[in-house]
Amino acid sequence: MQYNETELKTIANAPMMAGMAISLVDLGIVSTAIEAAALGKEFVGVAKKYPNNSLIQTVFSEENFKSGVIKPEKPEITPEEVQSGALVDRAIASISEAITILTDRATPEEIQEYKQFIYGCGEAVAEAAGSGLFGSGSPKVSEKEALALSRLKTALAI
């Protein structure tokens, strides 16, 4: 599978946007930092989690990260997008764009695992920190996060 640099970035951006959308539906200074670390951990571990998925091995290879082809970048996000829920819509649009690129170039199994990875990013973020000042409270997954995860799951058809 060969992807150009723009396609690689689009495919890599979708799970990043999903994780960030979940993180920002329920803002907290400490919890957001904990959630960012959880998202990073998902990216670092994806190649090991899906060792037989050539799509994931190609896009999320250590080589692509080291060379800077895949460089997780924080997208510009407005407070209005966060408050209105439009950030989740933006993440879903990003996912749709990535899936469109993959439709004729990856196997259905590879795409399904990629979708699971995207959802896993959102889920890891939601479960990383709870309520309260330092993110150590209960429940871990807020109502807003649960709703956003549900929207992601529906969009991913998983």
Image (cartoon, rainbow, N blue to C red):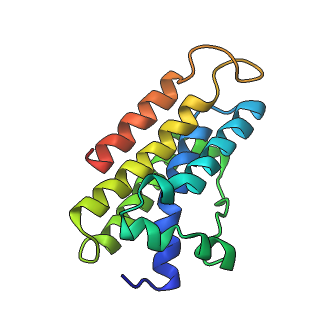
**Residue 80 placed where, x, y %?**
61, 45
Is residue 115 visible in the rendered structure shown here?
Answer: yes
How far across and how far down the image is residue 108, in percent?
A: 22, 63
Q: Which residue occupies the foreground of this view, 101 or 107?
A: 107
Q: Is residue 15 left or right of residue 109?
A: right
Q: Residue at x 61, y 40 (%)?
A: 24
Image: 8 above or below 114: below
Q: Is residue 70 visible?
A: no
- Screen quadrant of the N terminus: bottom left
Figure quadrant of residue 30:
top right
Decide which of 24, 72 is in the foreground and name it.
72
| Image point (56%, 15%), residue name | 139
Residue 34 in the image: above or below residue 92: above
Could you say which is closer to the camera, residue 27 or residue 105? 105
Locate residue 66, reporting x and y percent: 68, 74
* Nearer-the-camera pick, 106 or 9: 106
